[in-house]
Image: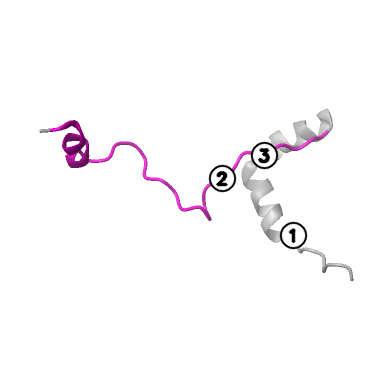
Amino acid sequence: MTKKQDTEERPRRGRPTLPDDVRAVHGSVRLTRDRWAKLRRLGTAWLSGAIDRAKEQAPRK
């Protein structure tokens, strides 16, 4: 059995990959120390909800 055949027959290990629309992406945000502390207290679930609830402004012409 070749190495390629051996790896094809093994079941995949680990977590399944998430679709692109659900996968989180790293980014960078600049905040004051006080705002970072508040964000840590509120948590990532709050931040995700706040972003989802926010309404975007109409583009200016």
Q: Are marks 1 and 3 in contact (CB under 8 Å)?
A: no
Please give the range of residues in magenta: 2-31
In front here: 54 or 42? 54
Tell me the CA gap for discs 3 and 2. Answer: 10 Å
Tell me the CA gap for discs 2 and 1. Answer: 19 Å
Residue 13 belongs to magenta span: yes
Question: Eyeballing the image, is 59 above or below 18?
Answer: below
Closer to viewer: mark 1 or mark 3: 3
User: In the rendered image, which quarter contains the C terminus?
Assistant: bottom right
Residue 24 has which mark? Answer: 2
Q: Amino acid at mark 2?
A: Ala
Q: Amino acid at mark 1?
A: Ala
The image position of residue 19, as x and y in percent, is 46, 53
Residue shown at 76% from the left, 36% from the top: 38
- Element assignment for label 2: loop
User: Residue at label 3?
Assistant: 27
Residue shown at 70% from the left, 35% from the top: 41
Of the image marks 1 and 3, the number of the one nearer the N terminus = 3
User: Residue at label 1?
Assistant: 54
Of the image marks 2 and 1, the number of the one nearer the N terminus = 2
- Element assignment for label 1: loop
